[in-house]
Amino acid sequence: FMIVASPCALVLSTMPPLLSAIANAGRHGVLVKSAVVLEKLSTVTHVAFDKTGTLTEGSPRLVPIRPVPDAAVDDAELLALAAAAENPSEHPLARAIVAAARDAGLTLQPVEDFGSTPGHGVRARIGEDLVEVGNPTLLPAVREIAHEMVDDLEQTGHTAVVVRTDSTVVGVLGLIDQARHAAADTVAALTTLTGARPLLLTGDNPQAAAALAAPLGITEIRAGLLPEDKVSAVRELEADGAKVMLVGDGVNDAPAMAAATVGVAMGRAGSDLALDTADAVITRDDLSTIPAVVALARRARRLVIANLVIAATFITVLVAWDLFGHLPLPLGVAGHEGSTIIVGLNGLR
Ligand code: ADP
Ligand code: MG
């Protein structure tokens, strides 16, 4: 009785499928941080994507450089100023601006008192001047003319950032990024898998967000979000019973990742905070691994349930047989060990 009633098979029902799935995901470029995360992955009903660096390549091109006409800086000076202030930042827009300045052969001045605010932009002291580069909707006192320049750029799907020195707008930079090649297929696969279209949560302007999302088949777009707005968007969905997976790369996505059922970070493009907060990391930034890992997690869950049923059935039958009939000891041992081996092997599939 002690042999057939001991729950070895039950104990072995869950870990082999979950650990095998974690190993399998790892081989295919997804680092799942724990077995609990894998279980949560199997329950995901909605997927929310960040834009810059997640759905896009994260290597935007700096296209137009537009100094404000009477600001006494030319294109090169404006770019040098913005690049110097952005130099310490790890944001994809910052890297693009710095790269453009280096390509143009400009030397970047050293900066002091650098600071960056997620979703807003950066500020730094260059010599005597306080230089700010960032989101046009959040830097106040953007003058009429700069407004028009920003609108022009945003109409054409650009991300516009304004450059100010000592609260005077000196110019606007336009950046454009392209979608990752696997983005459209990933959106389609996730729609089929979860039965709900993925949504886009971005800090960028609505036009740039729409220009990117439409060709990918994303219809629900929330733009102009600060990090805390991304958290509210996730909480709102979860309050309606959704289990949200948030995929992002930036410091600005980390709070929403923590609020979501599962947070997923882009391994290469991702900032340290995003990587640390995330429950899973896509190590090669290959978006197509997202639907694959959800499907894998669901399969692991099905195996766990099958194993629990197998183990419980063996134990019940053997115990009943022993109590109410006559179970020969060798058969009891074979049944007990046999069921343990069956669930172990089944889990390893
Ligand atoms: P996303 O949610 O698409 O990843 P972010 O929240 O990182 O976008 O950025 C939102 C907006 O904030 C950008 O479109 C830009 O206007 C501004 N911004 C954020 N960081 C920077 C930066 N380092 N330099 C310039 N602008 C920035
Ligand atoms: Mg981002």
Image (cartoon, rainbow, N blue to C red):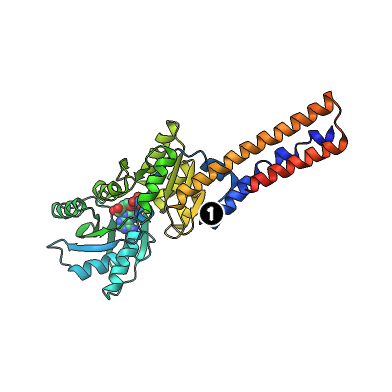
Q: Position of residue 205 (x, y in %)?
A: 26, 48
Q: Position of residue 325 (x, y in %)?
A: 84, 25
Is residue 276 or residue 80 the one in the foreground?
A: 276
Q: Is residue 338 left or right of residue 149?
A: right
The quarter holding residue 82 reads bottom left
Is residue 197 or residue 326 the one in the foreground?
A: 326
Residue marked by disc 1: 31
Up-down: is 239 above or below 248?
A: above
Q: Residue at x 32, y 67 (%)?
A: 98
* Amino acid on which the number 1 mark rests in the picture: Leu
Q: Residue at x 26, y 59 (%)?
A: 175
Q: Is residue 71 left or right of residue 242?
A: left
Q: Quadrant of the N terminus?
A: top right
Is residue 234 or residue 196 the one in the foreground?
A: 196
Q: Is residue 224 left or right of residue 264?
A: left
Callout 1: few (<14), some (14-19), or many (20+) C-alpha neighbours within 10 Å?
many
Q: Position of residue 295 (x, y in %)?
A: 50, 44
Ligand 1 quarter of the rendering: bottom left
Q: Residue furthest top?
A: 324
Residue behind label 1 places its C-beta within 8 angstroms of ligand 2: no
Q: Position of residue 331 (x, y in %)?
A: 83, 37
